[in-house]
Image (cartoon, rainbow, N blue to C red):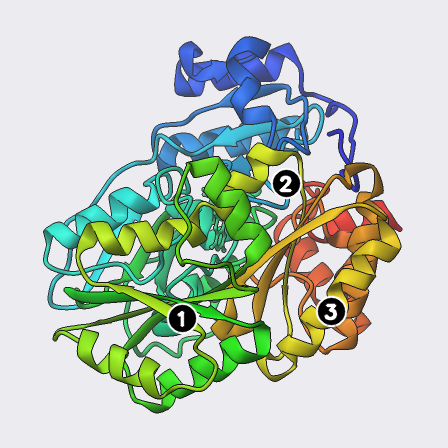
């Protein structure tokens, strides 16, 4: 793997052509890719900052094939990087050099929706958009949503414990996952898919594998809870003078008892970038320092209540509201196109942090100096899920200064009692800073779990704890 803070790794003993041939016998030759022209999209991450050189890409069709592939890799001592949609933003799905890249995008089974339990079991390779469509066709919905919905897979979302734009209403991925089936590092298949709401029969293995970033097991099927459809939606883009006023408005809307479903924050420079990238007109007659996007959703219309609450709230400089699908989408575009627009502008240093929400305004006031001190002249585009105090700090024109920028921002985050990774995970990119959030005893406990389940360190070598070790 090349790229800042990424881990290398020699080709595995026992790997090589014999293993490639053995994998071909399991999945069929055309699902084992070695030609660099065919493996390109699997090797480099979404940000284009990290890339690796796998022994091969292997694309099994079902759990049995995944188990056989993993067993063959274990027998050969070959490290395995698990990959879903490859939309992760911390390089966890980028293969170590010489790894077998285990792509699970062919695991696309959609089992029937269990309407009584309001749950469904799906293959790990099902995209978020397809899960949403499947749930909606059954009169229900899925509680997690994010801009990478057309590519991100249920396996990846579970492995990263993804958050997204609906955490305010439904919680993160861990709050949706009620069961998993997974292949362990020796090829054993474990399954706990009953989805019982009450089940105190030992350690929470489902919870453990959720957020394990491909370092403990390959998830093959996931059972998730579904939520009632919220047919009446209204979106407001609210112009504000900064982070503090945005939080004031949000507090007022919450106090008004509105059925809030999302609350997102972005700033003038990000909206300018999005506008030029997506050719959008200005949302207001004049520019404002910051914008709060809120969505209300429920079984009944709430537009009048939202307008009334915005009229009462302190801190609203201007606001525009839409309840029809096109109008709502147009307002969301100012926020949702941030990630794409930033990537189109260059290769960003991506940081995904959270601080206690009451300290968010002070943190955002200090942030520019921290970035400027580490990378003079760099451009920071900041946006995020404001209700959870979660900001995505994207630093452009700073790839050569990636490490000092990351260090400065994450140390500032830690000084605020925050998290160095609110939703993207640690991957290969953030291990060096893990001790800012996790104590030695916690890290030692994680190591014992990893060693117990994967003693040869085959899954996600160089990811999470491996990323910390590579940095030490
Ligand atoms: C435009 C854009 C917007 C985004 N917005 C958000 C957001 O709002 N919130 C958020 O949390 N994230 C967001 N992300 C990040 C990303 O979409 C999520 O991390 C997502 O969960 C990754 O899913 P994936 O299938 O692409 O996983 P990958 O990128 O393929 O893998 C991510 C990690 O999960 C592991 N993994 C993948 N599949 C499996 C499996 N079946 N079993 C075991 N391990 C596995 C990999 O080894 C890797 O460590 C965004 C990304 C983009 C590009």
Label 2 or label 1, whichever comes before in sequence order: 2
Callout 2 crowding tier (Cα within 10 Å): few <14, some 14–19, many ≥20: many
Neighbourhood count class around disc 3 (C-alpha, 10 Å): few under 14, some 14–19, many 20 upward: many
Lower position in the chain sequence, tag 3 or tag 1? 1
Which numbered marker is on residue 413? 3
- Horizontal side of residue 371 vs 318, given as left or right: right
Regarding mark 2 in the picture, which secondary structure is present there? loop
- Inter-mark Cα distance, 2 to 1: 39 Å
> Is residue 182 visible from the viewing direction of this image?
no
State the residue at coordinates (40%, 87%).
252
Q: Residue at x 40, y 52 (%)?
A: 146
The residue located at (43%, 10%) in the rendering is 29
Whether residues under marks 3 and 1 lie with C-beta atoms below 8 angstroms apart, the answer is: no
Q: Classify residue 64 as left or right of residue 131.
A: right
Front-most of residues 97 and 16 = 97
**Gap between marks 3 and 2 measured at Cα:** 21 Å
- Hey, which quadrant is residue 178 in on the image? bottom left
How far across and down, in percent of the image, does residue 433 sit? 78, 59
- Picture quadrant where residue 201 is located: bottom left
Outermost residue, front side? 285
Residue 19 in view here: yes
The mark that comes first in sequence, 3 or 2, is 2
Left or right of 435: which side holds 302?
A: left
Q: Nearer the viewer, residue 468 or 132?
A: 132
- Pointer 2: what residue? 91
User: Badge 1 is on which residue?
Assistant: 318
**Pair 3/1: label in front:** 1
């Amino acid at each position: 793997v090349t790229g800042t803070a990424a881990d290398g790794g020699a080709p595995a003993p026992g790997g090589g052509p014999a293993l490639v041939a053995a994998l071909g016998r399991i999945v069929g030759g055309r699902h084992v890719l070695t030609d660099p022209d065919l493996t390109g999209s699997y090797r480099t991450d979404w940000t284009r900052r990290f890339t690796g050189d796998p022994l091969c890409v292997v694309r099994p069709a079902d759990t049995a094939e995944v188990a056989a592939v993993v067993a063959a890799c274990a027998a050969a001592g070959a490290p395995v990087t698990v990959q879903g949609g490859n939309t992760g933003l911390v390089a966890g799905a980028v293969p170590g050099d010489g790894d077998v890249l285990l792509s699970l995008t062919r695991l696309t089974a959609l089992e029937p929706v269990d309407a009584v339990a309001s749950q469904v079991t799906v293959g790990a390779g099902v995209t978020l958009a397809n899960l949403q469509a499947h749930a909606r066709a059954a009169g229900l919905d899925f509680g997690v949503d994010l801009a990478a919905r057309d590519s991100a897979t249920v396996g990846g979302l579970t492995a990263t414990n993804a958050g997204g734009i609906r955490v305010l209403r439904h919680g993160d991925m861990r709050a949706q996952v009620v069961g998993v089936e997974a292949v362990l590092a020796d090829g054993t298949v474990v399954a706990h898919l009953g989805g019982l709401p009450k089940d105190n029969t030992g350690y929470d293995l489902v919870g453990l594998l959720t957020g394990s970033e491909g370092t403990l097991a390959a998830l093959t099927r996931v059972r998730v809870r579904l939520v009632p459809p919220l047919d009446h939606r209204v979106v407001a883009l609210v112009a504000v003078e900064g982070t503090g006023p945005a939080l004031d408005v949000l507090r007022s809307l919450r106090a008004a008892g509105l059925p809030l479903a999302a609350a997102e924050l972005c700033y003038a420079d990000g909206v300018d970038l999005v506008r030029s990238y997506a050719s959008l007109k200005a949302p207001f007659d004049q520019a404002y320092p910051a914008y709060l996007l809120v969505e209300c959703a429920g079984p009944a219309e709430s537009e009048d209540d939202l307008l009334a609450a915005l009229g009462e709230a302190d801190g609203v400089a201007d606001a525009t509201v839409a309840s029809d699908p096109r109008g709502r989408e147009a307002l969301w575009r100012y926020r949702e196109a941030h990630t794409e627009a930033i990537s189109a502008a260059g290769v960003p240093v991506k940081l995904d942090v959270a601080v206690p929400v009451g300290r968010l305004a002070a943190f955002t006031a200090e942030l520019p100096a921290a970035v400027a001190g580490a990378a003079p002249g760099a451009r920071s585009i900041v946006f995020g899920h404001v209700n959870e105090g979660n900001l995505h700090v994207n630093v452009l024109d700073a790839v050569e200064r990636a490490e000092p920028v990351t260090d400065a921002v994450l140390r500032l985050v830690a000084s605020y009692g925050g998290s160095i990774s609110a939703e993207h995970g640690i991957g290969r990119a953030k291990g060096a800073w893990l001790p800012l959030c996790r104590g030695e005893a916690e890290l030692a406990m994680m190591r014992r779990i990893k060693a117990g389940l994967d003693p040869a360190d085959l899954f996600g070598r160089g990811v999470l704890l491996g990323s910390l070790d590579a940095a030490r």
